[in-house]
Amino acid sequence: MMNWNLYSRGDKFFAIVVSILIGMFTAATLYPFIYIAAVSFSSGFAATAGKVVLTPIDATLEAYKYILAEPMFWLSYRNTFIYTIGGTLMSLAFIIPGAYALSRPQLKGRRFFNLFIAFTMWFNAGLIPFFLNMRDLGLLDSMFGIIIAFAVNAFNIILLRNFFEAIPQSFEEAARMDGANDFQVLWKVYVPLSKPAIATITLFCIVSRWNGFFWAMVLLKSEEKIPLQVFLRHTIANLSDTDEFALNVLDAAYSAETVTAAIIVCSIIPVLIVYPFIQKYFEKGILLGGVKE
Amino acid sequence: MVEEHTTATGLPIEEAVIEAKEAQRHQVKNDRWTRLLDHFRREWQIYAMLLPTIVWFVVFLYKPMYGLQIAFKDYSIFRGVANSPWVGFEHFETLFSNDQFLRAVSNTIKISALNLLFGFPAPIILALMFNEILNATYKRAAQTIVYLPHFISSVIIAGIVITAFSPTAGIVNTVIGWFGLDPVYFLTQPEWFRPIFVGTGIWQEAGFGSIVFLAAIAGVSPSLYESAVVDGANRWQMMWKITIPSILPTILIMLIIRIGNIMEVSFELIILLYQPATYETADVVNTWVYRQGLQSGQYDLAAAAGLFNAVVAFALVMTANSLSRRYSRTSLW
Amino acid sequence: MAGVSLNGIVKRYGAVQVVHGIDLEVAEKEFVVLVGPSGCGKSTTLRMIAGLEEISEGELAIDGRYMNRVAPKDRDLAMVFQNYALYPHLNVADNMAFGLRIRKMPRDQIKTTIAETAQILGLTNYLERRPSDLSGGQRQRVAMGRAIVRHPKVFLFDEPLSNLDAKLRTQMRAEIKRLHNRLGVTSVYVTHDQVEAMTLADRIVVMNDGRIEQVGTPMELFNNPANTFVAGFLGSPPMNQMKGKLTENGAQIGSSEIKLNGVTAQQAGRDVIIGIRPEHVTLAPGEGTSPLPIALDLVEPLGSEALLHARFGDDNLVFKADTQGDIGHLTGVGEVHIPALLVKIFDADTGRALSVGA
């Protein structure tokens, strides 16, 4: 269908223009990351004076030294790992059995339970009742509270349920005839058969945990419990609010801008490391959970 | 069996018939009971699997819905949800005479409208362009890059925006400086907030959003293009005459979803980017709720605003779904 | 090993009843085939035996034990599915071992069992392969292997050959038959293919519309179909059926009259359906035959024999004739001869077979 040699001159021109436009959009997407990386490796003076465009100016590691020497950085990094790993495992522990049960035709009240879960996608009580509920449950300023309260969401359950439903029922039946109970059917047959869908959900969980910010900011009061994103937010806010800091370090090796940029780089790196592994899954996954015909 | 029963008890025929019918009915009922019991005895495991999820939904999502009643109460922390006195629609009256709240509603709609106008076509155009790229490696690499910002947290996005738009150090003002213009304090100026916010949204989501449309394009039958080639169509004509009409249902569904989500603005990013100077254009319902409720402790009033938002959003989603059902015979769920 | 007994089995989905009371005794070591058109309830019946569908009414016993309320895993049956349902993430050996592991059979015993079974099925060289790397026939064998290793009381087959091409189907059919002769396990086999039914079964159960039409050995059903449905279902091509009226010593079909054996004068005038199998007509008159004039439409050579498609009045008829290496002599056929002894007569209203002379 698409064969360069069969293209007319006009088609070739069109294809080249499109390639260039795509290249520009891609470059525009990439540029802010490059810019931030360049700032993080520049001297405070060069950054503050707005000299950084594409490459580090007066290259230095001072900004990194500053944040890596900050104990809160390490603590919040550790916390983020705890929230990400603990939260993702918690999510899977709820979602996999729940989605399996909802996908079984023999489940009585299946329509009701599906509606019960889907309804929360269309209507939710909002910030205040959720917050007050967390307070009533005694889950304010609790790491466990963060992990459990965001463990499940309707979208992920429905995504996995749709996947389970698409697996021919005869696999379940064959396993039952072979003597398996429901737990064995799920664990030994359905989970291995659903690797792409489970990988997608795991990915969604990891990303949303890694990036989770708002509720951690609202619910957590103790500094030693905050995740990286909240620490990052505090740092950015403090650095840019403190004129003093900016003035004092004008001639220093780092500045508010370079430190901010360095923290951003540090917190993006894990995402960049995982990204290639997850990319092959999410394109499929996003469609799985999408429109159901 | 019925006859035996009659003879055994020696009842008059009519009564015996009645009793037999009763016995039969009893047996049927019994049967249904035993069958139900059998069902649970055999299938209890799937109910056990479902239970934690259901409990979770009740505790974390449905219980707050019960708590929504504080929107109609004079809520105090000490009395709790159930014991606070009812005040009817007082909070709603307060809301609708509150200029800040009304401004937040209007800002929500305006920001959503801008998002729709510029943010909605972007991924479609991107997908159509990707479809024209012949070199698979180039296409793959470009896709990998444009999907990436979707996975970056709003705190980092905000950090990048703040750094890039900084009056002295930011690249944007550096570039402006090249043209001899004075630096602009972008993030403190209300008229710049919405363009920056919507533009950031496009940068972050256009690539990822194109996945759905690329999948729709992949589903178009190649024979349509082949017959178009035979008919002498060029690529530009094929895009307009084949690709776009073929993915129109997908476009329509995605548009309806967007309309259904008008009340949902990504308020996390707004909280990170706005400041009192830009409230005028930046403050949306959810950021207002956040300030009134979580920062100032006016829980009942904020809950009322949240309820208003949720009800409007729910109505929009329901309308959107019924529209989608009517026009595309495809339900969103 | 054991028999299966169905007593008044009914299946309802809500208010819709799809199986209307099945009574059937499958003897120990017997191979019974349930055959019928799609939607006749044969698969549902099999699935009720398996325990995959609840039984709405009636009793099921296996090996003399009441089974209605027993979970499938405790019924000690093995089933071969239409799509094989081989676990794609496990190799052949693990697929076969799945049920044994779940039943906690000791490791070395699993190993020997699988080795033996693989030997029987010619799968020894494929044990390490995934199902996706196997051909259709090999997958089919693995599915059977998975059933065999369990040494169940009863084998259930749900259209196991329908995903194979015609040639492989013939081959696997023979293999199943050999396997049954060797293992002698009670088997219930569901198919819509009457050839499979005829070739495999000890007894055939013809089902239609959720009911049993007839039960019997293949030859019983072929020779003495109980009604027009069975007559039209078994045999290929199926039995020709023509409307007619009984006369004093035969039957009137259109303007022709054919002789029948043992017709009594009292029955004359009764509306009937006359059935004659394609292979039972002759081209030349013989003893006890009556001629039937036909209008020949089409001759389809099959090799040693040919199918003659012809019309008689409004009825389309099909006959078989020997080609003797050539079909030239068949193109001019204008009448066939019907042997009185082989004609079947059915009641025109009920479709039931009439024993002529009774």
Image: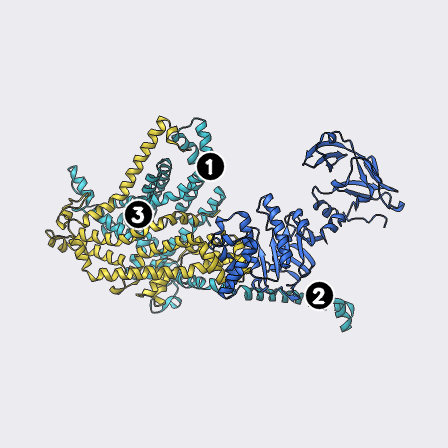
The reply to whether residue C303 is visible in this rendering is yes
According to the picture, the residue beneath numbered tag 1 turns out to be: B221
Residue in the picture at 43% in, 32% down: B241
| Image colour assigned to chain B | cyan
User: Which of C59/A98 is in front?
Assistant: C59
Q: Are marks 3 and 1 in contact (CB under 8 Å)?
A: no
Q: CA distance from mark 1 to mark 2?
A: 63 Å
Q: Nearer the viewer, mark 3 or mark 2?
A: 3
Q: Chain of mark 2?
A: B
- Residue C182: percent from the left, percent from the top? 63, 57
Judged from the image, the secondary structure of the residue bearing numbered disc 1 is: loop
Q: Nearer the viewer, mark 1 or mark 2?
A: 1
Please name the residue that numbered disc 3 is placed on.
Answer: B149
Which callout, 1 or 2, points at the residue further toward the start of the chain?
Answer: 2
Residue at image coords 70%, 41%: C237
Q: Residues within 10 Å of mark 1 (few under 14, many from 20)?
A: few
Give the mark, 3 or 1, whose residue is nearer the N terminus: 3
Task: Identify whether C259 is placed above or below B47.
Answer: above
Q: Colour in which chain C is shown?
A: blue
Q: Which mark is residue C209?
A: none
- In percent of width and height, residue A3 lies at 39, 32
Identify the chain of the residue marked 1, using the numbered disc in the image: B
| Residue B221 percent location from the top left of the image | 46, 37
- The residue labelled by disc 2 is B21
Q: Are marks 1 and 2 on the same chain?
A: yes
